[in-house]
Amino acid sequence: MKLSRLSLLCAGLLLAGIAHAADADHIHASHAWIRVLPGALPAGAYVTLENDSGAPIALRGAGSTIYADVMLHQSSTAGGVSRMSMVDSLDVPAHGKAALAPAGYHFMLMQPKQPVKPGDTVTLTLQFADGSTLATDFIARPANALDAGDTHADHAMPGMDHGLMSHDH
Ligand SMILES: [Cu+2]
């Protein structure tokens, strides 16, 4: 487990041309998935992070060898209008969890260098404020998916479709 995670990390670092980053030992990632939208629409990436250390750890962003541009965003709804904004970081509390999930925090993935389709696995290297990184495999899911698909069946939820919101960047 440790070895395969390390080798994934090394491969990602080699491809990205970055050296000397430490593995984020106290962060565990689960339910990592990407919602793939048709055409050139940006994809949202979601993951649950657990911090088993006694101090908060801030997620700053992620890197990818597939997507040229990855940003940390937060969706919010005010007065029935959905919008999203860029955020600098997301704290994973000490001995706690933080979730990137539809209608909340997400990575916005843009400019894929190759087509990504449902069923594909995409590795994102999560980057934390202390300089540590965590290579995490994200499973690509179709546009109507609501979660990673590993716990319960999808069900319809109208109204909060990320893909229908405009991105002016
Ligand atoms: Cu977004």
Image (tube, helix red, strand yellow):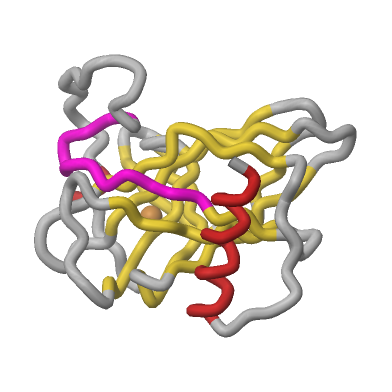
Q: Position of residue 102 (x, y in %)?
A: 37, 36
Task: Locate the N terminus by quadrant.
Answer: top right
Q: Is residue 100 above or below residue 125?
A: above
Q: Image quadrant of residue 98?
A: top right
- Describe residue 91's horizontal placement relative to residue 98 as left or right: right
Residue lying at the far bottom in this picture: please name it: 17
Instruction: Count up the numbered dots.
Output: 0
Which residue, as the protein is rendered here, is positioned at the far top?
A: 152
Residue 91: percent from left, percent from top: 71, 43
Q: Quadrant of residue 122?
A: bottom left
Name the residue: 51% across, 69% down: 12
* Residue nearest the viewer, comparing 96 with 19: 19
Q: Quadrant of ligand 1?
A: bottom left
In reply to whether residue 167 is colored magenta, the answer given is no
Q: Which residue ends up furthest to the left in the rendered image?
A: 39
**Which residue is painted at 25% across and 59% down in the image?**
166
Placement of the C terminus among the 4 image quadrants: bottom left
Determine the residue positioned at 27% across, 71% down: 112
Point out the stretch of residues depicted in magenta. 136-147
Q: Relative to 98, say whether 85 is above or below.
A: below
